[in-house]
Amino acid sequence: MMKFNGVNHLAMATGDMDRTIRYWRDLLGMRLVAGLGGPGYRHFFFQISDTDLIAFFEWTGVTPVAHKDHGRPVKGPFIFDHVSFGVEREEDLWELKDKLEAAGFHVSDVIDHGFIHSIYSFDPNGIPVEFSHNVEGADIRKDPRMIDRSPSEITREGPEPQPGKWPPVTRPTTRSEWVTYPGAGSELYHGKKSS
């Protein structure tokens, strides 16, 4: 079975890349590891961890979104609530809280969710951001928990992927058919610019 190794990158949008760099690189300390761009277009990547990145497209006319409290229900078309970044130590959570408040960003109290402790804030683009520390001895990845009082039949099937729920692959792509095409960023390593 295939195994995922993390979030390669989350892709967000901004109308002000410089302000975004100040927040993600200089305030949070995430390294700026790649930058693509040209007139009217930039796409920059910040390192979250050894395997995870967050990226931003800078598009003219993008404005910060209005703040919506993390997890507050909405109606109508909607695709994103918030993103949570893990920190190694409980002390890191409090250090982040102090840094964000000193920089003028609203930050919630530290909230105990049982398996994580979290703070909530917003980046300069209005993106709802959570920072979380895993509670010692409470790892839902190793010991999944479900306390939904009225779970659906599908939920009752448990935490493991259920085979046979989707059509099987009947003709896998052979290695001889594997072809990749240059895209934005290929010039960083191959010297070729995408068309």
Image (cartoon, rainbow, N blue to C red):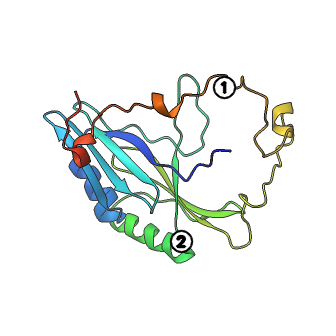
Q: Residue at x 44, y 42 (%)?
A: 67
* Residue, far left: 39
- Dot in front, 1 or 2: 1
Judging by the rendered image, the residue that carries numbered circle 1 is: 169
Residue 117's quadrant in the figure? bottom right
Answer yes or no: do the residues labelled 1 and 2 have beta carbons within 8 Å? Answer: no
On screen, residue 132 above or below 176: below
In this view, the residue in front, 157 or 165, is: 165
* Residue, far bottom: 91
Question: Which quadrant is home to the N terminus?
Answer: top right
Query: Residue 103 in the image: x percent, y percent?
Result: 32, 64
Judging by the rendered image, the residue that carries numbered circle 2 is: 88
Classify residue 73 as left or right of residue 179. right
Question: Which quadrant is home to the C terminus?
Answer: top left
Q: Residue at x 44, y 44 (%)?
A: 10
Q: Residue at x 79, y 37 (%)?
A: 162
> Callout 2, which amino acid?
Glu
In this view, the residue in front, 32 or 12, is: 32
What whole-number distance in Å separates the C-alpha atoms at marks 1 and 2?
Answer: 40 Å
On screen, residue 105 above or below 158: below
Assign a secondary structure to mark 2.
Answer: loop
Tell me if I can see residue 122 in this picture.
no
Query: Residue 29 in the image: x percent, y percent?
Result: 35, 66
Compare marks 1 and 2 and give the one earlier in the sequence.
2
Query: Residue 160 in the image: x percent, y percent?
Result: 78, 45
